[in-house]
Image (cartoon, coloured by chain):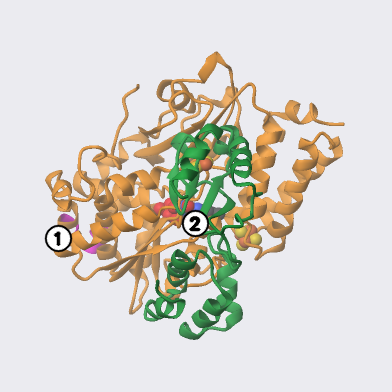
Amino acid sequence: MAEEMRIVLRNYGKIDPLKIEDYIAQGGYKALEKARSMDREALIEEVKKSKLRGRGGAGFNCGQKWSFAYQAQADQKYVVCNADEGEPGTYKDRLIMENDPHTLIEGMAICAYAIGATKGYIYCRGEYPHLVDVLNTAIKQAKEKGFLDGFDLQVRSGAGAYVCGEETALIESIEGHRGEPRFKPPYPPSEGLWGKPTIVNNVETFANIPVIVEKGADWYASIGVPSYPGTKVFTLTGDINNKTFFEVPTNTTIRELIYKYGGGIPGGKKFKAVQIGGTSGAFIPEELLDTPVAFDNMAAIGATLGSGAVFVLDETRNIVDVVTRIAKFFEHESCGKCAPCREGTARMHEIMSKLNSGKGSAKDIETLSRLGRVMSYSCLCGLGQAAPAPVLTTIQHFKADYNAKLV
Amino acid sequence: MKGYKEIIASYADVPGGIIEAYHAVQKELSYLPEEAIFEAAKVFNIPVSEAYGVATFYSMFSVKPRGKNVIRICESAPCHVAGAAEVVAALERELGICMGESTPDGLFALEFTECVGQCQATPVITINGKPYLNVSPAKVPKILAEYK
Ligand SMILES: Cc1cc2nc3c(=O)[nH]c(=O)nc-3n(C[C@H](O)[C@H](O)[C@H](O)COP(=O)(O)O)c2cc1C
Ligand code: SF4
Ligand code: FES
């Protein structure tokens, strides 16, 4: 298999995740010590300069986000880790937490120092009950060693709601409410958990922090594509020989992911499509495979990097069938707070099912396109806005599959 | 076995702890009885409608009685193309119930779920949160035997 570059998974397989001594022996918690010896503004400046951008899907500059929370005046601030990982086909955050929980804890502690937070939460999806124990053990060890002085860190469980990955829904859920997204602004760095300034970052984002502090912003910024530097963890599923994960620099192309790392399509079959970023991602055809995986490069082809899920379909797969399944997902996961999404996802699933059962007409495809366009700008949160992407991109790139199913 | 009152009371001081309390109640009872929702409303000092709203928002919570061992089958796209439908059929056949139902002896409940984050080995099912990987219809009887 092709060579990877492991930053967030640097300790994968090298340490016993439940032994803090192992982590320390690999240089763990040195970055926290260094960070705490730095001036807070200089620390945030360093993170900004590394150009680390959020790994949870939105790609916001991490240091910049931190600076908003740092500047906010409040008697209490919070650091929250988004470990909800609900995007189908994604398990990278689980890999990090399972194999190296201390890198996440260290990243969060550095953030807490930087913005002046004394409390933190890791919101771990309900589907990962075993990780709650791993994280609690690791937190206890870090406390005993004195690394968490002045930082109270707790784990909270989700309970099976994809929308709770959206940062304001996640905050609602920690507060013990239904996980319905809030109107933005205000954004969490000014008003988040219990109305206080809050940083929400993804697991993979936090896992990068200790290494950036240790090796410096310039080193990090020089890896991969300059506008979205560093590495990204990808999880490969579907019709692919190596159904596994890879951490690669962001200038890696989609083609390299599928063929060099993924080992290509099984059974000598031909490639048909790949959906990147999870179930809300675009479907990408063969001719766009030479695109680098970095955030803006993906955006330029109408796709998203998202969570880094890579779902490959071979020539025998029916796109309409797969997209119908995906449409059901969104109908089920829509929280129902806003009408365009609550109604839109239901209608989208209805029309896709009609097309998939061979009862649809060209007019239905037209309706789908219009519905999708309206949803993408009128829905309240990213769930409803992104839900039409698989439908719209497959109508764009794989129209033949739709046409073959018309009455 | 602890009663739901005792369980919920132990989360009274946890800010926003109602979801944790519900998880703990379900661990004992497999579902959230109406009395437990009333109790949670009292302990967390919120209207019953809100306590009920939380209970029904999250797919892992059930306000209806269900089998002790909750089997969830991932139907997200990667598991879908790997043959989740055949696993569904095998489970329904083996247990003699349909998706969404529980066995008459109260031992098993059968539910759909979306991705459970074990997509390196599709199709995936979980039983009481424990994942089973690369599940095929042939493997179903042996997996179920663990819980009988
Ligand atoms: C429907 C929806 C689901 C999301 N799910 C996740 C998730 O599972 N994990 C995550 O880190 N971010 C998720 N996000 C993005 C978060 O809202 C937020 O941007 C992210 O946690 C910020 O962290 P980052 O800047 O480190 O990426 C989701 C967004 C939406 C709209
Ligand atoms: S877009 Fe959908 S998920 Fe988001 S708030 Fe509206 S109904 Fe809820
Ligand atoms: S898609 Fe089924 S476990 Fe992830």
Q: Residue at x 54, y 70 (%)?
A: B32
- Residue type at numbered disc 1: Ser
Which shade is chain A? orange
Dot 1: within a 10 Å radius of its alpha carbon, few (fewer than 14), some, or many (20 or more) residues? few
- Judge left or right: residue A215 versus residue A90: left
Alpha-carbon distance for marks 1 and 2? Answer: 33 Å
Left or right: A239 with respect to B85?
left
Q: Is mark 1 within 8 Å of ligand 1?
A: no
Q: Which residue is mark 1?
A: A37
Q: Earlier in the sequence, mark 1 or mark 2?
A: 1
The residue pinned by badge 2 equals A165
- Horizontal placement of A252 versus A239: left or right? left
Residue at position x 20%, y 65% in the image: A148
Looking at the picture, which amino acid does disc 2 mark? Gly
In the rendered view, would you say B64 is above or below A406?
A: below
Q: Which quarter shows the N terminus of chain A? A: top left
Tint of chain B: green
> Which residue is more in the foreground, A234 or A183?
A234
User: Is the CB of mark 2 within 8 Å of ligand 1?
Assistant: yes
Residue B39, given in percent of the width and then of the height, sits at 51, 82
**In x, y percent, where is residue A198?**
39, 67
Which residues fall within the magenta stretch? A34-43
